[in-house]
């Protein structure tokens, strides 16, 4: 694929060089176009060395007066990394006063935008209005993520991981619509079981894997119902979000929304226990030991296994040991079609990471390892195997 990599002016510009390297490694031809502000953060020579092509910068220092038109016509996809608030505003308004913004207006292919900026700039109504304009044009927006920002603040505005951006660019250039006609019900995030009006029992789930699955399903053409516990994530665009807090609320919503679902993916980390009797007032701290009487929460996956009908049921198993054995046990005991198992407790993959490394155990007896990758990429691998299960079931029915 021939890709234009537009680089905006921001400290995150150095990560654009990694995106260029990754795309080159994957066999794509990359033509870099930089704004004047981008040159203040990273030099054009860096991109020339990584891509083997001169980085284009000045609209008026070119050999051909219509070179921006030629570049637009010769390439298949335009990716903006990083997309600053200024660039997003100029794109949304149709302003064209340099090579990149002029090229943008002349480009007719898919556009991927990876925003990066200060959290307050990202949240500003003007930026959000520009974002909505770009989305309405069908552009793919990757991120931004939450985290520590170069300005010293914490919040949404950090550029997404280069691996995730490169994968999104490849998906945008080769869109798959193989889930059209499917309704996918996804559960995500933790649940919170109250102890009193201010305290609760929960776990370390961030919800990122479930949200990545919802995003992947929408991108591949499915209708998606996302039932989410409390998380600090924006819902993927195009999903139907149902917010819950406790395990009982999640159970009730799962069965209320189950009717149209053809695929159910239970990625939520539902709390296993809840307090038998919630204290109506805040429990006061004393020197005495406190004992809690806990009851098990509803086993949503087991109940789904009994009532799934001809739906595909995908469960998740977060384990600290015996991964394959526990995944197989869960597959059989809960009547799942596939179980996605991963080790938790570390920081590189799992609950609190942007990446995951999983084991897929299927009813057909297969065990497949998915190497460490961005959770969005892992989500696509899970759907690849889910569709294989669907084909196998259809083949069995025809026999």
Image (cartoon, rainbow, N blue to C red):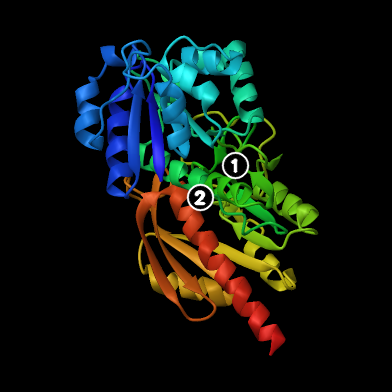
Tally of numbered tags: 2
Labels 1, 2: front one? 2
Residue designated by label 1: 192
Up/down of 271 relative to 136, above or below: below
CA gap, disc 1 and disc 2: 39 Å
Mark 1 neighbour density, 10 Å: few (under 14) some (14–19) many (20 or more)? many
Q: Is residue 13 left or right of residue 195?
A: left
Q: Residue at x 51, y 12 (%)?
A: 96
Name, please, the residue furthest toward the front: 64
Q: In the rendering, at what x and y percent does residue 316 appear?
A: 52, 60
Marks 1 and 2, the one that precedes in the sequence: 2
Q: In the rendering, at what x and y percent does residue 393 appear?
A: 64, 78
Q: Is residue 85 left or right of residue 47?
A: right
Residue 335 appears in the figure:
no
The dot on residue 144 is none
Residue designated by label 2: 174
Up/down of 316 relative to 219, above or below: below
Where does the C terminus fall, quadrant-wise?
bottom right
Q: In the rendering, at what x and y percent does residue 175 appear?
A: 55, 50
The quadrant where residue 254 appears? bottom right
Q: Nearer the viewer, residue 103 or 328?
A: 103
């Amino acid at each position: 694929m021939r890709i234009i990599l537009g680089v905006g002016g921001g400290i995150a510009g150095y990560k654009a060089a990694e995106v260029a390297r990754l795309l080159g490694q994957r066999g794509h031809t990359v033509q870099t176009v930089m704004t004047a502000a981008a040159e203040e953060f990273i030099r054009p020579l860096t991109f020339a060395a990584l891509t083997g092509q001169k980085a284009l910068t000045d609209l008026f220092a070119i050999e051909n007066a219509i070179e921006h038109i030629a570049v637009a016509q010769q390439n298949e996809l335009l990716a903006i990394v990083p997309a600053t608030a200024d660039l997003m505003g100029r794109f949304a308004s149709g302003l064209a006063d340099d090579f990149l913004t002029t090229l943008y207006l002349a480009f007719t292919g898919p556009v991927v935008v990876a925003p990066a900026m200060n959290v307050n700039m990202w949240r500003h109504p003007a930026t959000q209005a520009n974002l909505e304009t770009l989305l309405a044009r069908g552009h793919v927006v990757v991120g931004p993520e939450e985290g520590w920002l170069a300005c010293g603040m914490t919040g949404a505005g950090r550029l997404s991981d280069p691996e995730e951006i490169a994968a999104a660019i490849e998906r945008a250039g080769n869109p798959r619509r193989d889930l059209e006609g499917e309704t996918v019900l996804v559960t995500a995030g933790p649940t919170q079981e109250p102890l009193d009006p201010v305290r609760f029992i929960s776990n370390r789930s961030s919800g990122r894997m479930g949200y990545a699955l919802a995003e992947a399903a929408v991108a591949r053409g499915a209708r998606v119902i996302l039932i989410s516990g409390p998380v600090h994530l924006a819902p993927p665009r195009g999903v139907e979000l149902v917010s819950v807090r406790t395990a009982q609320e999640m159970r009730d919503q799962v069965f209320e929304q189950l009717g149209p679902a053809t695929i159910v993916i239970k990625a939520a980390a539902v709390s296993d226990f809840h307090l038998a009797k919630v204290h109506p007032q805040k429990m006061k701290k004393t020197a005495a030991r406190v004992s809690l009487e806990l009851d098990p929460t509803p086993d949503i996956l087991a109940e789904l296994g009994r009532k799934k009908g001809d739906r595909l049921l995908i469960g998740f198993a977060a384990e600290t040991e015996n991964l394959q054995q526990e995944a197989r046990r869960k597959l059989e005991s809960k009547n799942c079609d596939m179980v996605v198992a991963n080790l938790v407790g570390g920081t590189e993959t799992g609950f609190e990471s942007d990446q995951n490394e999983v084991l897929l155990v299927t009813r057909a007896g297969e065990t497949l390892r998915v190497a460490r990758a961005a959770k969005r990429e892992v989500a696509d691998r899970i759907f690849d195997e889910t569709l294989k299960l669907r084909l196998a079931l259809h083949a069995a029915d025809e026999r």
